[in-house]
Amino acid sequence: MKILAPFVLILAALMTVVYLDDAPPRADVVFVDAAEVFTLDPQRMSWMQDFRMAYALYEGLVRWDNTDFSIEPAAATTWTVSADRLVYTFIIRDDAKWSNGDPLTAHDFVYAWRRAILPDTAADYTAMFFAIAGAEAFFNWRVQQLEEFAEQNADLDPQARAKAAEALWRRTEQRFEQTVGLEALDDLTLRVQLVRPTVYFLDLVAFGVFYPVHRPAVEGWALNDAITTQMRQHGWKRVDEPDFAEREFANLNPDTGRFEQKHGWTKPDRFVGNGPYMLTHWRYKRGLRLGRNPYYHSPDRVGSDSIETVSIDDINTAILAFESGRVDWLSDVSAEYQADMLAERAAYDLRYADRIESMLANGRTVDEALAALPPPESGERRNIHTFPTFGTDFYSFNCRAMLADGRPNPFADARVRRAFVMSVDKQIIVERITRLNEPVSTTFIPRGSIPGYESPEGLPYDPERARKELEAAGWVDRNGDGLVQNAQGEPFPVIDLLYSTNTPRYKNISLALRDMWRRGLGVRVELRGKESKFFKDDLIQGNFMIGRGRWYGDYGDPTTFLDLFKTGDGNNDRGYSNPYVDGLLAQAADEPDPAKRLRLLEECERFLFDEEVPMLILCQLVQVYMYEPGKLTGLSHHPRLTQYLWQLKVVAP
Amino acid sequence: MTGLIVRRLMQLPIILFAIYTITFCLAWLIPGNPLQNPEGRQPPPEVQQAMLEQYKLDSPWRFYWDYLGKATGVSWVLGAHDRPFDLGPSLTHQDWTVNEILAAGLPVSITLGLLAMLLACAIGLTAGVIGGVKPGSAADFGTLLIALIGISLPSFIIGTVLLVVFGVWLKVVPIGGWGGVRYTILPAVTLALPFAAYIARLTRFGMIDEMSSDYVRTARAKGVPQRQVVLKHAMKNAFLPVLSYLGPAAAMAMTGSFVVEKVFAVPGIGTHFVNAVLSKDLTLIMGVVLVYSTMLILFNLVVDVLYRWVDPRIEMA
């Protein structure tokens, strides 16, 4: 039995390790997000789950009311707009504080926005800040200076290079102050000068990337008691900046001259934010927990004391966790059997249709109505919910004249594109293939999502017209083999249809499209499924004929969608270019009258989706949530589907 | 014995260098740009280029030597870098360094792996001995059947069934995550089952062999009780093939299983082997492979040493 001794010892040691690594007690609200939080640095965010955290951990100058997306004051109490709509002046609340007790000042916004504009930060949303006067020129200047720096100083010794990098940085700071229309008039007043009357500017300011950061925390300044006390009074602006050697998370790279940011500051013991919550736990792949920010100016607005997001990658496990009561909200139920679960919800709705209708007529919300009904029986459920979003599912046509391999591209011809669009029966796809019954669509901007904007008609499902369009483009079945040929008798090239394999959704839709085009138009389609990373690579290089895509709008203006069709835009995967579209977008950008501006954008979308169709639009995307109605409150159902964690609350059933 | 250990330890850097080089070549050939979002917006091209430069992804040569220097600590020794064994920032989880990711995941994987191995030994040896002592009996048939199930049912099915029964119906364990004993039991059992089944088979065959050997017959003839024959004489020798299997098995269990980690949402390092490659997260791929290789080599060494200690007849290079 001696041989057992080491095993028992190992077991005891392991159990101790496991026991000591205990999880904290359950938070008030627990949810599972679509993916792991990527970053808590607001200027570098671009994922939905990250922005959700931004809206809890930070507070911008203004915020959206997430029920109707009007603008309401947040860190700013008031603001004024000049008559020509080019100058915005924000007055910041005098009781707004960071989670370490330092006052929030206008300088914090100048600093954060400067980070977003600097090419050094590599922010995905840099271009959004080009609405500010001088920002784009400053960005280009810095890019060019950095290029010259790398060339000119290659031969210097490291110390001289470090000096040169610092000199360039000082010049950069000065140039920013002098040329960019962003100024802190005093500690609580921020003035922003715009390039053109951007009617949706406040909508941008409410977006996460415009939220402030606390400079000493972000750069990891070495602080002593005297400095800390001084900052507690007036903020960091009145304190001398420490040398780069004394900044833990920021340095200047002597080889490239670039300002480099390390990300240690986003960890719980170092994090400083100005939002309703602060970061209390964040462990890689274990979850992230928020607790109340003791210095938040309006604690009454905050629904729960603590909120936790747990990392559960596998959607099946997440659903089981929800069923067991461990999780209150699943924000993205993309399981393969989601349609079956939705059918159970439909069965429940059908049984109580009359009662639900009468309760809605009496002014109750859907959630309240559901909660008031008897619990579902087997084969029914009421805890799964679909919401249309501010996003569109589509397939891109490659619009370049030539394909990546040098062959001429049949889809450069708008008639061919129209033929392909009109031969697709979208209703069948949402009913039988995705089975989510998404609202089918013919236009890129979700219909009715932007007040005052009239969407164009778009192209209908019309197989007859589709064949005529293809014929007009010269593609006819000339030899009776069921496939179309051009005048020279060459068959239509086999269509290279590119999709990503991260969900089965696009494989299924692509298969359906293949059959529809084969039968409707007499063309052959070859599917090419790729893992999402490789898929994106092919898409960017134009190595496809038709490729799947999806797009979510960022702010409440048509340009968040239509800018994709600008010649040379970074997100123009289609390689689409048309001077008329570019002209309309430029004209709209300079138009000060909001109503006239919308008419210009309407014409732009009409031209794009009635005539040019660089995309086959399928449907408005929907999001599937799971939560117990009546138990979890505070979720917004507005299509922009922005959830503020501080509004969430679990109420005892 | 010391000679063996010293020799093996001297081979370690050479093997690691070869693994590093081969992995780097393969990882570099993966198409795609690790800094690019597959969905959504793209930053301006100048910014993308600058990012590639910052992470030294613009030239394979630069990345190869820079990473090698930082990961091995050579740059630190030369004073070019501020800390040794720096595996760099993760390219796809930019708020974390690879060192932080491994420091968070490795202890979890090791704990879970060791627990699973202990469980596997306990279940496997017991089942194997029971079956091996009376081959063809009902007990043997029963253990065989269980072993068959353990080997042939995929972990995600066993795991999901366990979650449904103990998590949703009985509500005795929490679903998903890590932190405390209750979170550990189900993943450990799921991870242990295939290993247990294999160990049971190995032990059973070993026992059948040993039980029919001359020395066991002699022991029986002398009147040694059955219990002592089995536990003291036969099992000792039947254990040898199991021991040689335990080395690689432990390394395999401790570096985490992609499936078990996914089903139970265990924050170990197993998922990185797959996800890092899919997202072309070069620093994470290299870090995970280097750490895993080191562990594997050291484990094999430990097993070889143990083996020689248990059975001094074995000669090893």
Image: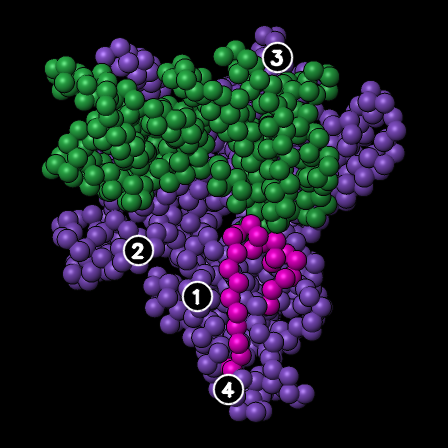
Task: Find out whether the residues at labels 4 and 3 contact each other: C-beta distance under 8 Å.
Answer: no
Amino acid type, label 2: Tyr
In magenta, the rendered stretch is A521-545
Chain bearing tag 1 is A
Q: Nearer the viewer, mark 4 or mark 1?
A: 4
Looking at the image, residue A278 sits to the left or right of residue A359; the answer is: right
Residue A237 at x, y percent in the picture: 66, 21
* Residue that numbered label 1 is attached to: A509
Chain letter, colour green in render: B
Q: Name the one closer to the observer, A288 or A10.
A: A10
Looking at the image, residue A362 sits to the left or right of residue A507; the answer is: left
The numbered mark at residue A337 is 2
Looking at the image, residue A35 sits to the left or right of residue B31; the answer is: left
State how many labels appear: 4
Residue A630 lies, with reference to residue A420, above or below; the image says above
Amino acid type, label 3: Leu
Dot 2: what SS? loop
The numbered mark at residue B252 is none
Q: Nearer the viewer, mark 4 or mark 3?
A: 4
Tell me, yes or no, whether dots 1 and 2 are on the same chain.
yes
Earlier residue among tags 1 and 2: 2
